[in-house]
Image: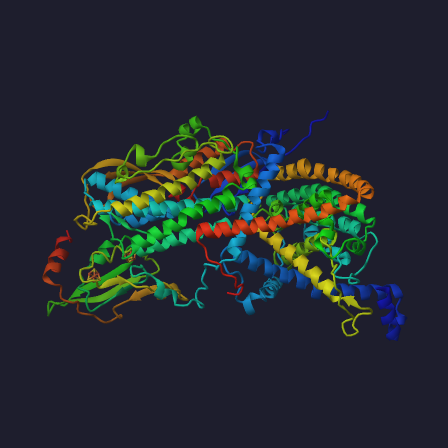
Amino acid sequence: MATTASTDAVPGFRGTYFGRIKNAIISIMEGMSVTLGYLLQRPITIQYPDRTPKPVKDTLPERYRGILELDMKTCTACLACERACPIGCIKIEVVKDKETKKRYITRFDIDIAKCMYCGLCVDPCPGGAIRHTNEFEGSTSDVQYLVRRFVPPGERIEPAKPKKKEKEEAGAEGS
Amino acid sequence: MTEFITEEMTLNMGPQHPSTHGVLRFQLTSDGEVIHSVKPDVGYLHRSIEKIAEKVTYHGFMPYTDRVDYVAAMNSNFAWALTVEKLGGYQVPERAEYLRVIAAELNRISSHLIMLGVMAMDIGAVTPFPYFLRERETINDLLEELCGARLTYNYIRIGGVSSDLPDGFRDRALRFLDHFEPIIDEFNRLITYNEIFVNRLANIVIIPREQAIAWALVGPNLRASGVKWDLRKDEPYSIYPQVEFDIPVGKGEVGTVGDCFDRFIVRVDEMRESSKIIRQCLDKMPEGEIQSKLPRQLKPPKGEVYVRSESARGEMGYYLVSNGGLNPERVKIRTGSFSAMAIMEEVSKGIMIADMVALISSLDVIAPEIDR
Amino acid sequence: MERLADYIVYNLPFLQQIPRVIVDLIIMLFFATCMLLFWVALFAGITSWVERRVAGRIQSRIGPNRVGPQGFLQWIADGLKCFLKEDFVPAAADKKLFLLAPYIVFAGMFAVFVVVPFGDGLIISNLNIGIFYVLAISSLVVVGILMSGWSSNNKWSLLGGMRSAAQIVSYEIPVSLAILPVILLTGSLGMQDIIRAQGPYPWQWFAFHNPFTFIAFFIFFIGALAEGNRTPFDIPEAESELVAGYNTEYSGMRFVFFFFAEWANLYIIAALTVTLFLGGWNTPAHLYTNLFGLLHRSVDVAGTFVFILKSLFLVFVIIWIRWTLPRLRVDQMMDVCWKYFVPFSFANIVGTIIWMVLADAAPVLGYVRYILFVVGLMVPLAIAMKITRNFRLAKSEIHLNPFI
Ligand code: SF4
Ligand code: SF4
């Protein structure tokens, strides 16, 4: 196929011949003085992870949404977090002992590999049992280690007693 | 005279190509350096977010909107919140509105910073990119303090926001803006008015006003073609009517209205306007609640709604159908990058490969936003 | 070289059994390898470290800082890594050309070192056609780049190779023409003669000799950048357009050879500019030594030091330009060459000839060099002023310690 390379359709430079030379010299000098200025300034990067003045973990703001942590002592097994999680990476199993009529948590797993740190599970928790930490360096050698098991397998843990008001709230939203 | 026979070359630009901003593919046919046709091939980043929306709750879809446009996640959050609030008729406290606008405008600046930096890098100047990113880091730090995350914020909640300003945020934000405004001038000296840069962009791929409207370009791309259209002004939502700002439009400063340089400079100017908005919001912000009382499981009434808002890449619209249940019946997202991709085929005939790179980055397409 | 070969053969009698040609060849190969390993590799390596460090600081980063003190040994680590990598040849590549291309590129650059002077008497071969040899031999690079681009059987590489060929061939013209005024003034093509024709003080340099050489200096420097594929003319390897240009498909040691050539070339550009326009190794005072008898005659250490210092400064300038400027488009690159550089260089030659005639008649023209020197001084001054202004406006703080 014969083609016409339409290079003249591509508009050329602007300005007059010498004007363009002048523009080029001035603007290049401007640009070069900016970059040289930065050469004379302190770099802003830090040498993560080992040569930072403080561990990066300690410099994170209080609200930082890192890996989730659970306080089993205050968890009331209300399942609000499990319901709020859009991915379903929280797995809670609660059994009722037929004799004592008590509830026990037999499983509380958070799959950190699936978690997107959105914080939606933290909001509804009545006692603040589930919360984000500043921990963000969670690499392991196998993806299965990323499932955090807060109830050791085979054990069962008695949930904390919900305070009165919380109980109502937890009941109300179960609709 | 015998005719000089040349052969067309088919080139595959992407999906792994440095200037395709994510995973895009263009099928080019070219005669040496001059491109004859471009066929955009989208879909490499399709994550079926719209389908996921049908499986999660209204609150639970919020983190997914972060992923629609991860460069300006806050604006995406904002749009979803507006949509559900309109359908359900939920109220938002005034302080929360201000917080939303502050966060969204900060995010708009950081999104534009990325686009400008990447564009400079695509033109061959690598150094402006780290400078732009450095400013963006400060914004990320601010947003991290505010909501705990640096990229996928999930800050805005239906009926409010997740958290109030932390202590000292106002001072830090103002300090950043004081530092940032002179830095914009420095950027201009470094790269914007550099003779080589100007020559690479001026008069390249002019999209005239009519064509821009006909191809449904939105946001800064549309404004660069000289159309003064900004949803924040023309279809005001949230507290935008109460703040003063201008809408920068392409003026054809060094070439013709609607060329690549205009698309660049419009965003530079928009950062200044955003910083103006943030300053006003920080001053005017009232005290009060940040989240209205809503049930944990939202059940908006049956019906459908389409709400659009101005994201960093232009109009972002959510079309939502509700069946009165816990999950949306259908969600459709309309994004700015998609329409920008559509025009690519039309305008890129006869340009050179180097201009193609400039065009892609000047339209500011973000691959995940195209495919969703 | 012959003298050295004579000396070795004389002292090692068993070599006399072998035909002299072969002995010469082996000795030459041996020395070439030594040069390659201890001189060019060192220069390329250190230049790469300097480039990455300077680039880092310009971009507000630190740059390589892990291997060795301040990351100084990074280039050895990188070289070693590439050395151990698989030498991959694409299935559809033209294998022979593909394997050969990096060596041709490298040989083209490496051969230039033969005539690069390092000091008074410190030159591998003081050819009487020195600068002509440089122009001729460095054209070999085009062949190599074109070969690599073609044989990779990758369209991006091909485009890169084509662009590079077009670019180098075009820019050879203004570069050669910019050298001519200097040759006219010197009356010789030898590198050492050109340096000797200049003086130790800046106003005695050819760059400031007359207005035409002043312009020629800039044309030569920028044209040399273009010939070496450096920004703003790094069009053949434009990473945002052509992925990596002609070396996209290369890996391992062959890839290193391309970069070897690139960084060696960085030094060559600088050294040639210093030789031709910036006074070379001329110093007001001399410091002769024969390095504890290692050399067969004494050399001027002060001159060598000055020469390398000037070259390194120019290397820094090239790096600085590279990390500041955007890249031209192909047609603009050609525009710059044919519409700006070529006419100016022709004017320079004519101008220089007229100047030489006039200067004989009116010695007062000799004072123009002082004016030009002052004009040249304005450039760093203007940049310094702009930097101060930038610091003031952006309220930046100065931090001079290069070792962070
Ligand atoms: S942070 Fe989000 S994704 Fe992770 S467990 Fe909580 S709700 Fe689920
Ligand atoms: S919401 Fe809190 S209390 Fe309820 S189950 Fe989850 S962690 Fe336990």
Image coords of residue A139 (percent x, y): 40, 64
Q: Quick check: A55 left or right of B288? A: right
Q: Quadrant of the N terminus of chain B?
A: top right
| Quarter of the image with the C terminus of chain B in it | top left
Q: Residue B7: in sight, yes or no? A: yes
Ligand 1 sits in which quadrant? bottom left
The picture quadrant where one finds residue C12 is bottom right
In the drawing, does residue C186 fall left or right of residue C261? right
> Residue C175 placed where, x, y %?
72, 45
Q: Vertical placement of B127 versus C80: above or below?
A: above
Q: Give the image quarter of residue A57.
A: bottom left
| Foreground of the two, C92 or C39 | C39
Residue sitting at x 40%, y 41%:
B370
Give coordinates of residue A95: x percent, y percent. 18, 65
> Does the image show residue B53?
no
Of residues C386 and C121, the one drawn nearer to the viewer in this rendering: C386
User: In the rendered image, which quarter is residue A143 located in?
Assistant: bottom left
Residue nearest the viewer, comparing C390 with C173: C390
Q: Nearer the viewer, residue C383 or A160?
A: C383
The answer to whether C163 is drawn above or below residue C30 in the figure is above
Colouring chosen for the image of the structure: rainbow
Q: Which residue corresponds to the image point at 55% horizontal and 43% vertical from the top-left? A: A27
